[in-house]
Amino acid sequence: MSRPRIVVVGAGFGGVHTLRHLERRIPTGAADIALVAPHDYMLYSPLLPQVASGLITPQSVAMSVHRLTRDTRLIPGHAVGVDTADGTVVVRRPTGELAPVRYDRLVLAPGGLTRAFDIPGLTEHAYGAKTLAEAVLLRDHVLAQLELANDSRDPVEREERCRFIVVGGGYTGVETAASLMRLTEEAARRYPELRSVIRWHLVDIAPKVLPELGDRLGRRALDMLRSMGIEVKLKVSVREVTPDKVVLTDGRALPCRTLIWTAGMAPSPLMETLGKPTQRGRLEVDSDLRVPGLPEVFALGDAAAVPNLSHPETPYCPPTAQYASRQAATAAENVCASILGRPLQEFRHRDMGLVVDLSGKDALARVLKYELTGLPALAVTRGYHLAAVPSAPARARIMANWAIRAATGGEVSRLGFADDGRPASFVANEHVDYLDTESAGREGARLLENLRERYGDD
């Protein structure tokens, strides 16, 4: 019997943790394990707002897949289609060519993309906050606006450059607004004339911020944001974006050259290529994480609709890093069980809570039934992140970053990444050409036949 080929798609929380669990369960050399991912690192995305503010260096949250795994082979590129009939993943390599990757077991954890709505000017002028490149470029852009405003004598230009609008009242939006506002406060010490001009806004169509925290902590978060000087406007969204203006749905037109979009996540289009039922783009799976009708394919994380057996009032598990990490253990166990012909496990997980770092000494935490604020919340928040980071070198870097900031203060110099203007990474999903179901099957069969002609059936 040949060694089984296990292919994991995605180097996020779900994918990398699945690989680590697989390597613990499968003896060295007993299976061929491969990872399909565009980058050779796992991004610890919960700390991206602190990268954007300069509190943490980018390398601290980008952990090498080669260091986190032992026997996994990295296949660079985007998985753009799955040919389930021939057991093949179609991969678009960085060179642009398509390549087949055969599998006996497939684990799909491709994550999601920033959701872009049909708002005039949004994709042309907004900044994202989901990727490492976006976080680094966003910091440079914000600092550049203050430098340019300080150099300008035009009061209209100053107002445009000193107003910053964050859209999205969830975890990412709230932390991004708080962290970057602290950055502009530090930078304004060099530009005293701008202190009275800098304005931060947080807008969301929802009636509350951070609904996951519950009503009491949610109201506390709202009060804390407003006490920091951030204007929070709820039940409002964006109607139009221009290079120097943002128009809200309540009719206000705000002079602004920085709109940061964090309002929502769209599952990876890869899930649609399987031709199986989806829930708003998330691939439906059974409680054992297996795709119905495809016993060799498993899915988890942001792009999978996983039944929430522990909380029946919520049909599907929330697309969070905590759930993806826990689903990975079940996925790995069930992949091994399916190869050995053993019964599969159902995924069950009790939500452990949520932590929110508002930068400085402000934080909020809900741990099981306990609600925390202030320094206790900050300690729990920082402790949670250190425990969740799967790399000892990364934990050391993060702790060193926090200690250096506490002892010496922050740096507000630009690194030059945004000198050429707005980054294009906000619309990165448009740069990847995913296949439809028919094309995935056709291309998979063609590429597999070419592979067999060159190398034989092995």
Image (cartoon, rainbow, N blue to C red):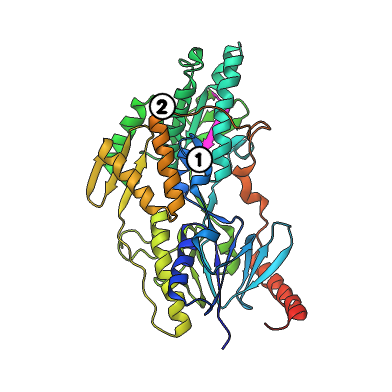
Residue at 62% x, 78% y is: 85
Residue at 63% x, 32% y is: 416
- What type is the residue that disc 2 sits on? Glu
Would you say 380 lies left or right of 307 here? left
Q: Which residues are magenta?
A: 255-261
Q: Residue furthest left?
A: 370
- What type is the residue that disc 1 sits on? Thr
On the image, the x and y values in percent for residue 244 come to 61, 25
Residue 197 position (above or below residue 442): above
Question: For numbered disc 2, what is the local secondary structure?
Answer: strand
Look at mark 1 in the image and give the residue it sits on: 57
Would you say 441 lies left or right of 361 here? right
Q: Which numbered dot is residue 390?
A: none
Magenta stretch holds residue 260: yes
Asked if the residue under mark 2 is in contact with the one under mark 1, i.e. CB atoms within 8 Å, the reply is no
Look at mark 2 in the image and give the residue it sits on: 231
Magenta stretch holds residue 231: no
Would you say 230 lies left or right of 145 here? left
